[in-house]
Amino acid sequence: MSSAESRTTKAAAIAQHGGRVLPSVEVVHYNAELRDAEGFIGDRASNRAFRAILEDWRERLRAIGDDPLGECPSDEISKKKLDKVLAEGAPEAAGIIHGAIEDFAKELATVTGRLLRLKGWRDVERIVVGGGLRASRVGELAVGRASVLLKASGHPVELRPIHHHPDEAGLVGALHLVPSWVLGGYDAVLAVDIGGSNIRCGVVEARVKRARDLSAAAVTLSDLWRHADEKPSPTRGEAVARLVAMLEGLVKRARKGGVKVAPFVGVACPGVIEDDGSIDRGGQNLPGNWESSRFHLPSEIVQALPTIDGHAAHVVMHNDAVVQGLSEIPFATDVGRWGVLTIGTGLGNAAFANRATEARDGEEDAAPATDGEPVSA
């Protein structure tokens, strides 16, 4: 047996890693990596891009006078502070933020327009936007303005903020990775959302008695580790050990609170996730080399956490944008095709087709994006 086969056996899952056909939807397309002459187009609509735009506006004002936002660097101003200045600040300070919102919305609309030209995004009717920037009024206004710009340019698609708080959407979506029968006799599952700045783990209660479509699902316990703040940067092994420790702590807390946790861990991870649970590409912002052929995160978790309350643990991993988008399933039943954009360290993306309302597409449409060729600006 090869090492790849061995590790897959050790991390045997009840559903396929990176699965295309899920209980309620098909993952038609994800992780599109469109480029232009300047690099990845998605980088123009990331949280980092918004901060750069904000800084550009401030530099223009500093060239002829005072900066209404003071001396704090743009990348250190909290979203809460930006929202407060926007609502209550001096007119010029609020004006800078409005200018940044407008410019960022144009970039977001441009990137979205490029995605809508891809085969896998054809006929998408709605796009929900998650990620860190969305968790602010500034982000919501940028999404709303981008939606207006897209419609004004002839794209019949709506952009709207994702329903769940973006800190929780990437955890709630894990419920939709698992067959419904797994939840029989259990209250919740464990979920992991791995990002370029932090790792978040949570206990997600399904609450099927309140709503069978999982629209009432909620994160009831969570833990967060900001690995980007660690000095020196943690190794891959240290990151996995911290992740497992958080899961173990959550299981204990859930048990103490009378919550029955299923022996299932849903993992949302950046990049293209192969059906054996390896990461093909896209994990460059994570601590250490997560794309190595010698590294297999599902197996690492199972080996460190072999049982949950006496039952063999199962791990299923998928792309982080896909999982965040899955949290929207109960609220997207009125459309046939829809997508998700996650504005964070980068711009995550995924497109879905509701299985109840649309026939399945061919295998080639369901695969992760391979669109790496340049496109015109």
Image (cartoon, helix red, strand yellow):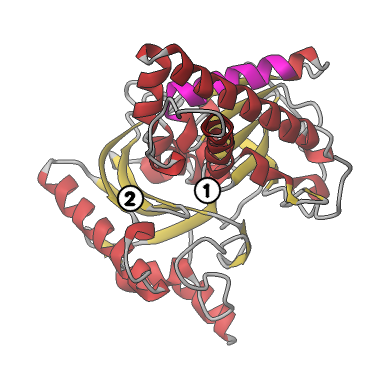
Q: CA distance from mark 1 to mark 2?
A: 18 Å
Q: Residue at x 78, y 55 (%)?
A: 370
Q: Quadrant of residue 206?
A: top left
Magenta stretch contains residue 139: yes
Q: Which residue is mark 2?
A: 201
Between residue 266 and residue 53, name the one nearer to us. 53
Task: Tell me the chief SS of the magenta region.
Answer: helix
Q: Position of residue 121 (x, y in %)?
A: 77, 35
Residue 228 as seen in the image, left or right of residue 19? left
Q: Which mark is residue 345?
A: 1
> Where does the magenta region start and end?
135-149
Q: Which mark is residue 286?
A: none
The image shows residue 87, relative to residue 309, as above or below, that is above
Nearest to the observer: residue 344 or residue 181: 344
Q: Is residue 370 left or right of residue 221?
A: right
Q: Position of residue 97 (x, y in %)?
A: 50, 23
Q: Quadrant of residue 284?
A: bottom right
Residue drawn at the location 43% of the way across and 25% of the way down = 68
Amino acid beneath label 2: Cys
Image quarter in which the C terminus is found: top right
Q: Nearer the viewer, mark 1 or mark 2?
A: 1
Question: Residue flagged by tag 1: what amino acid is it?
Answer: Thr
